[in-house]
Image: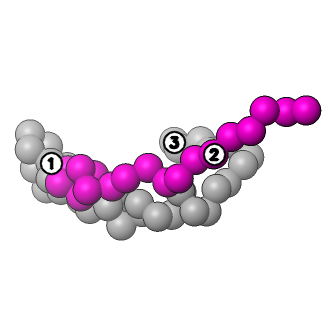
Amino acid sequence: MLRISGSLDTLTSFAGANCAQAVVASLLADPHAPDTSCAARRRPPDFTASAAQ
């Protein structure tokens, strides 16, 4: 079972969906050597924060 919190950030959640699906498919095809090469190419989204006033 996969539980997801009530918040959903579509920018980061779905941006890597194809990569995640490919990794899972390759894991099922070869559990000893899944292809995770697409994950290495992924970069985190820009992040900014500001102090609360």
Q: How is the image coloured?
A: one colour
Query: Is label 1 or label 3 in front?
Result: 1
Tell me which numbered mark, 1 or 2, is placed earlier along the sequence: 1
Mark 2 neighbour density, 10 Å: few (under 14) some (14–19) many (20 or more): few
51 drawn magenta: yes
| Residue type for callout 2 | Thr
- In the rendered structure, the answer to whether residue 29 lies left or right of residue 42 reads left
Tell me which numbered mark, 2 or 3, is placed earlier along the sequence: 3
Q: Which residue is mark 1?
A: 34
Q: Which mark is residue 1?
A: 3
Secondary structure found at label 3: loop
Q: Which residues are magenta?
A: 36-53
Secondary structure found at label 2: loop
Percent position of residue 2, x then y? 53, 44
Mark 3 neighbour density, 10 Å: few (under 14) some (14–19) many (20 or more): few
Can residue 26 be seen? yes
| Residue type for callout 1 | Pro
CA gap, disc 2 to disc 3? 32 Å
Percent position of residue 28, x then y? 20, 52
- In the rendered structure, the answer to whether residue 4 lies left or right of residue 14 reads right
Q: Are marks 1 and 2 in contact (CB under 8 Å)?
A: no
Q: Which residue is mark 2?
A: 48
